[in-house]
């Protein structure tokens, strides 16, 4: 990966500030920024009009679902909807699904102990229909602490063997996270979905009806979403965490929309997309996200046309060619990010840091995790005091030039499960492919000063 080329695509990186809160929101690609400006200056009219600018505006906005469909490998742009945030999309989905839910304990829902976006709507739906929401909770796993002087109570992960007992003939929907925004661990969605469908089929005598919805928000910046390969019914992510503006997208499988979803929109709107998509998402944002696809393709493919020529990219390449280009790019992203993970995890898990009380939250497996790394500082081996997460972040910020964050990151249930204070949560350093080893080195230097670690 050409890191100089990559960083040149993000104007915000030019001043040298180290953005390490990317799981909260990545920086915006310059092609996206240019597209927003160009749309507002040249085609800012209502969609559907017959005059020439209206036709051009409608065509431009249609590029948003077209490129998103290619990015996530859906069957059609008609399976893509948008809203201002993933939280809204998930709530819309729960509302649209409600009319097919059997009441009074006949249906059950399962959710992971993760971001509230893919938990809260199902808990509320269970309450409205008088059904149960069951939790697939994380479990203690083998961790680097076992190689030191003790074990790490915050080294947890999700084991499929703990999901299987929760599945039954009543299971109507399972809400998964493709990547934890705190633990940083990737989930094998294809394998898990196959297990869910097979187990429910067996336990219901072939009569069960289970659907799978996947939160891909923490996954999408690092790995490619492939809804066809995964065999899921619904999947959503936030473009503002994938180098775009503040807008979110959801894949809704056509067959699932037809059989399971009612309309939550105006009574005269009958097309599947707008029955679930309340109002029109920002036109300039929907058009601008079309520039994300060619940018991602360019990371691993030097001959990709400029993102401003997105129409040419789509018209000149078939789905297989685009998929192949995206695979190369995400492989390059994974390789770059693995070096960042190795450096930061390596520092945090050194014996010196362990003795001081630093504990990584989640697994330290370098192959199966995103560069979203959380930790806490407990009492040290020699009695050094524990430190509040907010104090560590404040200390780093006071040194200038680096942005990291603390908190529960809307996964308050997970923080509670870990026995950590909700208001303080964890320290999270979240990186993406445009970050560098030099930046990781600067973050480590800043952390050493705050935690008072001597070389």
Image: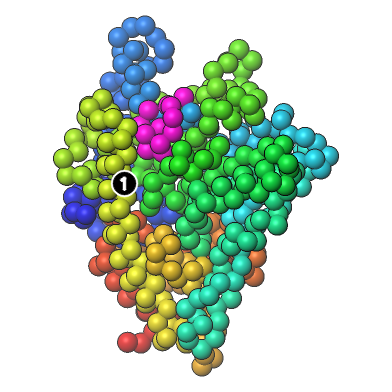
Q: From the viewer's perspective, is 418 left or right of 81?
A: right
Classify the position of the C terminus by image quarter: bottom left
Residue closest to the eye, 400 or 261:
261
Residue 386 in view, yes or no: no
The dominant secondary structure in magenta is helix
Image coordinates of residue 103 in percent, x first then y, are 80, 36
Q: Confirm whether the magenta stretch covers residue 133.
A: no
Tell me the crowding category of disc 1: few under 14, some 14 to 19, or many 20 or more residues within 10 angstroms, Cα based: some
The image shows residue 71, relative to residue 413, as above or below, that is: above
Image coordinates of residue 414 in percent, x first then y, are 61, 61
Write the residue at 58% across / 39% down: 90
Residue closest to the eye, 17 or 347:
347
Classify the position of the N terminus by image quarter: bottom left
Determine which residue is flagged by label 1.
327
The image shows residue 402, relative to residue 258, as above or below, that is: below
The image shows residue 388, relative to residue 64, as above or below, that is: below
Range of residues picked out in magenta: 66-78
Quadrant location of residue 165? bottom right
Q: Secondary structure at mark 1?
A: helix
Write the residue at 41% across / 12% down: 48
Write the residue at 65% across / 40% down: 210
Q: Residue furthest left?
A: 303
The image shows residue 28, relative to residue 368, as above or below, that is: above
Image coordinates of residue 161 in percent, x first then y, are 63, 61
Residue closest to the eye, 124 or 206:
206
Q: From the viewer's perspective, is 30 left or right of 175?
A: left
Q: Residue furthest right?
A: 104
Q: From the viewer's perspective, is 260 left or right of 346?
A: right
Q: Residue furthest bottom?
A: 382
Quadrant location of residue 433? bottom left
How many numbered callouts?
Answer: 1
């Amino acid at each position: 990966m050409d890191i100089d080329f990559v960083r040149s695509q993000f104007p915000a990186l030019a001043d040298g500030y180290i953005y390490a809160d990317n799981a909260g929101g990545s920086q915006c690609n310059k092609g996206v920024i240019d597209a927003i400006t160009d749309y507002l200056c040249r085609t800012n009219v209502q969609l559907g009009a017959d005059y020439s600018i209206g036709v051009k505006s409608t065509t431009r906005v249609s590029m948003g679902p077209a490129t998103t469909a290619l990015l996530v490998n859906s069957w059609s742009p008609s399976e893509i909807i948008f809203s201002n945030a993933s939280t809204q999309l998930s709530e819309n989905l729960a509302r649209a699904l409600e009319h097919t839910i059997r009441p009074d304990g006949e249906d059950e829902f399962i959710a992971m102990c993760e971001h509230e976006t893919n938990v809260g709507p199902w808990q509320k739906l269970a309450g409205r229909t008088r059904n149960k929401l069951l939790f697939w909770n994380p479990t203690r796993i083998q961790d680097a602490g076992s190689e030191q002087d003790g074990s790490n109570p915050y080294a947890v992960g999700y084991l499929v063997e703990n999901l299987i007992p929760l599945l039954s003939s009543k299971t109507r929907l399972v809400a998964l996270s493709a990547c934890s925004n705190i633990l940083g661990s990737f989930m094998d969605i294809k394998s898990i979905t196959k297990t869910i469908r097979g187990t429910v089929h067996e336990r219901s005598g072939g009569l069960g009806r289970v659907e799978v919805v996947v939160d891909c928000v923490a996954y999408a910046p690092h790995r490619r979403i492939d809804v066809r390969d995964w065999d899921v019914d619904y999947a959503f992510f936030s473009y503002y965490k994938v180098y775009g503006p503040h807008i979110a997208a959801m894949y809704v499988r056509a067959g699932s929309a037809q059989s399971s979803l009612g309309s939550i929109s105006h009574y005269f709107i009958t097309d599947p997309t707008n029955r679930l998509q309340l109002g029109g998402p920002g036109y300039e944002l929907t058009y601008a996200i079309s520039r994300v696809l060619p940018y991602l393709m360019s990371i691993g493919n030097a001959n990709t046309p400029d993102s401003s020529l997105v129409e040419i990219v789509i018209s000149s390449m078939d789905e297989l060619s685009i998929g192949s280009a995206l695979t190369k790019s995400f492989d390059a992203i994974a390789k770059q990010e693995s070096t960042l993970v190795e450096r930061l995890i390596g520092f945090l898990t050194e014996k010196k840091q362990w003795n001081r009380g630093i504990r990584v939250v989640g697994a330290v497996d370098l192959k199966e995790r995103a560069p979203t790394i959380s930790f806490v500082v407990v009492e040290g081996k020699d009695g050094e005091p524990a430190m509040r997460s907010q104090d560590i972040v404040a200390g780093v910020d006071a040194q200038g030039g680096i942005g990291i964050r603390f908190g529960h990151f809307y996964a308050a249930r997970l923080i509670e499960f870990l026995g950590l204070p909700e208001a303080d949560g964890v320290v999270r350093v979240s990186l993406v492919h445009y970050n560098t080893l030099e930046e990781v080195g600067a973050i480590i230097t800043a952390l050493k000063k705050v935690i008072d670690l001597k070389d």
